[in-house]
Image (cartoon, rainbow, N blue to C red):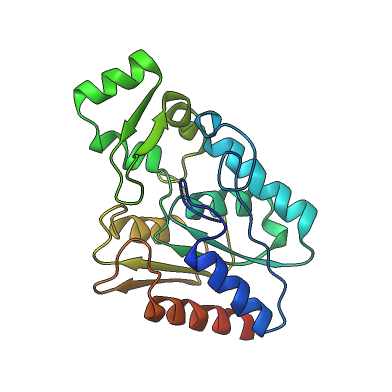
Amino acid sequence: MGGFRSDMTGTKALFLEDYCRRRGREYVRFDYFGHGASSGDFARGTIGRWREDAIAVIDSLTEGPQILVGSSMGGWIMLLAALARPQRIAALVGIAPALDFTEELLPKRLTPEQRQEIEDTGAIVLPSDYDPAGYLYTRVLIEDGRQHLLLGRPIPLDVPVRLLHGFDDASVPWQLSLRLAEHLRSRDVVVMLVKGGDHRLSSDTDLARLAQILDALLAG
C-alpha cells in the first residue's frame, strides 16, 4: 500500500513483486482512487475512500492470510484495512508509517495564512521534495482524516508488526513509529530505526533489510 501520491510502479512495490515471484508467493500491488493508473480525481480522494480501496483489494483479489506492507500514508491505510479485516491478516510491515498525518503532521506545517487558504478555497498546494509541482491537500481530506485517527487509544491488532523508519526522515518523524508501537495491542512489535535512512528507504541496503524482515515473517 503506497504513500500519498505514490503509485504501484514505485521502487518498493516492484521490488516486492520480484521478491514474491522468486519465492513462489502471490502478491498484489494496486493504485488507490486518483493515483497512478486508477481512475478518479485525486482532489476527491480521502483516507476513507483509500481505505475502502484497500479492503476491496483484500476481499476481491486475495485468498487466505495476508502480510500487508504499507509505506508512508500506506502505513495508515494498512492499519485501517487490518482493523476492518483482522481475520485475514497474518502480519503487518510499516515503512515510515504516516498514520494520522492529516492531524499529526500536516497542520503543524501550515502557516496561519495557509490554514486560512484551505478554509477559504478548500485546498492548497504545498511544495514537495517528491514532485516539483507540489502536493495538493484538500479540506475534505483533512476533515475525513479525523474520522480515521488511530493514535490516542489502543489499536486492537494482535498480529506480528514490523516497523522500519529512517533517522533522517524529513517527512515523517521516526518518533511516530514509536508512538504506533506503544498503541498496538500486539506483543509482537519490532521497530527498526535506520541510521542515515531517509523517508523512502528504497536503497539496495534498505530493500535487502525489507526482504530479511519478510523472510523471517514467512518462516515463522
- Let me know if residue 160 appears in the view: no
Quarter of the image holding residue 108? top left
- Give the answer, above or below, for where 189 lies relative to 211: above
Q: Is residue 186 left or right of residue 127?
A: right
- Give the answer, above or below, for where 39 lies relative to 9: above
> Which x, y percent locates residue 171?
30, 52
- Give the answer, above or below, for where 20 lies relative to 137: below
**Nearest to the observer: residue 189 or residue 132:** 132
Quarter of the image holding residue 30? bottom right
> Which x, y percent locates residue 4?
46, 46
Q: Residue at x 59, y 42 (%)?
A: 50
**Nearest to the observer: residue 144 or residue 35:** 35
Q: Quadrant of the C terminus?
A: bottom right
> Which x, y percent locates residue 33?
61, 40
Q: Residue at x 57, y 84 (%)?
A: 215
- Let me know if residue 159 appears in the view: yes
Quarter of the image holding residue 219? bottom right
Q: Is residue 86 left or right of residue 188?
A: right
Q: Residue at x 72, y 55 (%)?
A: 58
- Give the answer, above or below, for where 137 lies relative to 17: above
Q: Residue at x 42, y 24 (%)?
A: 139
Q: Is residue 65 left or right of residue 123?
A: right
Q: Quadrant of the N terminus?
A: bottom right
Judged from this view, the residue extending furthest toward the front is 132
Q: Is residue 82 left or right of residue 5?
A: right
> Which x, y percent locates residue 172?
32, 53
**Nearest to the observer: residue 131 or residue 54:** 131
